[in-house]
Structure formats: structure tokens, C-alpha cells
Amino acid sequence: MKKLIFIICIFCIGLNYSQNIMSFDEVIDNNGFFKDGYHIKDTKNELDKFVGTWKGSFMGNSYEFRIEKQLKYNDGYFFLDKLFIRSLIKDINGTTLLNTITTPLEDLYFKGRKFTSKNYDNYLLMYIEDMKCNLQGDVYFTIFENNTKIKVELFIPFNIVSKEECPDINKHSLLPQKRQNEFMILTKQ
């Protein structure tokens, strides 16, 4: 009898969790809203076209992005299939400006958020480079040319930052800023 009750409990728990899956389509249809505990799942493998090594240049710096897909990543209140980016950025002399190739997922500057439309060509990521100096915002990835190129743009919201909070107040992000009509093209390797 105890075994039967145990099996029924396991079945009910499994059934409960299996009903808490939403596809990217459903999230877009619901304007990005979903309930806590849900798993936002890449049911059509739309993230896969972004996965791989991508290279490009911007303002004399060379960029290498290693994009990986993480399944059922725990975002606190829900689970999400999302992209993470490990990056290696060097200046024109080959000096490393940023290297997150071996950085743990939780500490990466780029963390995936969502697709912005059902054509799945536009993906939005959260970017945090330096919170004190407001070098944070949304990174827009637009994939094109048969999934071989990505246009990268950073949108940093206007926030007032004081010289006391950020001694290097004129610091510029390593990424192209959408507000200044800057962008970068990465090519899949």
C-alpha cells in the first residue's frame, strides 16, 4: 500500500511539472508574461542557430563571442532555455580588454532573456559590464544571411551617474551603442 501511495505521489508531481512548460511562441503571445515555476522551453530549437563561435571587430578591437545554449536554467522564479556568451575582446595591439572564456555562467556579462518576435531572428540579452558607471543594458542580436552573421547593438538607458559613484565617468562600453547608431557585425566561424 505504501508503494502504491508513493508511486501515485511521484506520478502527480511529475504530471504537475510536465504541465508547467511554455514555448517561446506562448510567451510572445502573452506579451512576455508567465507564471512562476514555469519552464520557458526552446521547443523548436530556435536558439541553436545562435550557438557557436562568432568573430568581428569594432573601433579597432577584435571580438570573439562563444555562444552556448543552457537548458532549463534556473532564473530564480522560473526555468528558461537561454543563451550565454563567453567573450574575448582585444585591442588593436592584441592586449586583452575582456576575457570571460572560463567565467562561470552566473558571472558572465551577457545573459539571454527572450526573442522579441516570432520570426526568431531577434534575440534580447541582458548585459552588465559595470553597474557603478551604468555600463549595463539590453543587447540586441539580429541574425541574418542564412544564420551566418549577427548584428550586435547595446542599448544603455539614460541614468544619472555622479563622479563620486564612477570616477571614470567618461568610460565607454566595449560594445557598440544603439543610441549612438553604432553596431557591430559578427560572422559565424
Image (cartoon, grey):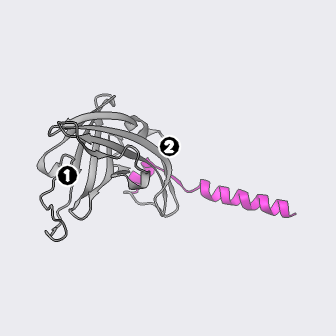
Q: Position of residue 12 (x, y in %)?
A: 69, 60
Please tell me which residue lies in front, 163 or 39.
163
The residue located at (20%, 39%) in the rendering is: 184
Residue 42: percent from the left, percent from the top?
47, 44
- Which stretch did the figure color magenta? 1-30
For disc 2, the marked residue is 43
Residue 8 vertical placement versus 103 (above, below): below
Q: Amino acid at mark 1?
A: Ser
Which amino acid type is marked by label 2?
Thr
Mark toward the start of the polypeptide (1 vs 2): 2
Name the foreground residue: 189 vs 91: 91
Residue 125, image x, y percentages: 33, 50
Q: Quadrant of the C terminus?
A: top left
Q: Is residue 181 magenta?
A: no
Q: Quadrant of the N terminus?
A: bottom right
Q: CA distance from mark 1 to mark 2?
A: 34 Å
Q: Circle 2 sits in a helix, a strand or a loop, which is it? A: loop
